[in-house]
Image: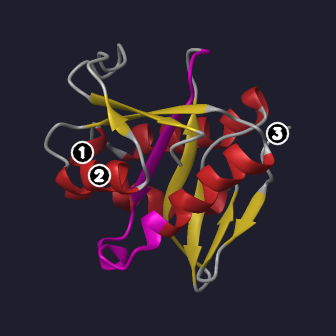
Amino acid sequence: MNPARTLQTPRLQLRLPVASDLPVYTAFAASARANLVGGPFDAPRAFEKLAAMIGHWDLRGWGRYVIEHDGRAIGHCGPLDTFGDTPEMTWTLWDATAAGQGFATEAVQEVIRHLFDDCGWSDLKICIDPTNAASHRMARRIGASITDLPGPTRWPEAQTYTLHRSAA
């Protein structure tokens, strides 16, 4: 079963990315917040990355969700698979004012619950910049285990975690 196109938590709407997300995503991509995901990125690269996020749903039938709070896009989370192997769970808050309020955790937990419980997925990997302490804490909080697996080719210095259905 493919994932739902929208999900809801008590505080958040999780929906597919759309073209109107480009201005807020471009602002994030140009900011220091993008450092931990390979950025910052200029506007053309931000366009490419958002287009890839949108297109992933067509190519794979699933992908990353935009996280909305009070009708405003504040980030994204969800699975990514560019190489046809174990999908990678990703999350990023685009808006610095949204940090520290549990939004990312709430969104990630709902997506993982949906993938494992409703869709029957069994495994996810998580790749995190070695210096991103907040994401390492989140990975442990959601039940992921650090591994000695190398990061993906596009990001060899990343530390890799695994998350199995039984742990989530």
Residue drawn where x is 63% and y is 63% of the image? 20
Q: Say which element carries label 2.
A: helix
Q: Specify the label residue 2 is tagged with.
A: 3
Q: Specify the label residue 36 is tagged with.
A: 1
Q: CA distance from mark 1 to mark 2?
A: 10 Å
Instruction: Determine whether, in the image, residue 102 is placed left or right of residue 37.
Output: right
Contact (Cβ within 8 Å) of mark 1 with mark 2: yes
Residue drawn where x is 41% and y is 37% of the image? 45
Q: Specify the label residue 135 is tagged with.
A: 2
Mark 1 or mark 3, which has the lower sequence index?
3
Residue 111: image location, x then y, percent:
62, 54
Q: Amino acid at mark 3?
A: Asn
Foreground residue, 167 or 25? 167
Instruction: Determine whether, in the image, residue 167 is placed left or right of residue 62.
Output: left
Q: Is 102 rendered above or below residue 116?
A: below
Q: Amino acid at mark 2?
A: Ser
Mark 2 or mark 3, which has the lower sequence index?
3
Q: Is 3 rendered above or below residue 70?
A: above
Q: Is residue 101 magenta?
A: yes
Q: Say which element carries label 3.
A: loop
Q: Is 165 rendered above or below residue 153?
A: below
Residue drawn where x is 46% and y is 57% of the image? 25
Q: Based on the displayed image, in which of its 4 quarters is residue 128 positioned?
A: top left
Q: Amino acid at mark 1?
A: Leu
Residue 12: image location, x then y, percent:
60, 76
Give the extent of the magenta segment.
84-105
Residue furthest to the bottom:
70
Instruction: Determine whether, in the image, residue 70 is placed left or right of residue 150.
Output: right
> In this figure, what is the number of numbered marks?
3
Q: Is residue 76 magenta?
A: no
Q: CA distance from mark 2 to mark 3?
A: 26 Å
Contact (Cβ within 8 Å) of mark 1 with mark 3: no
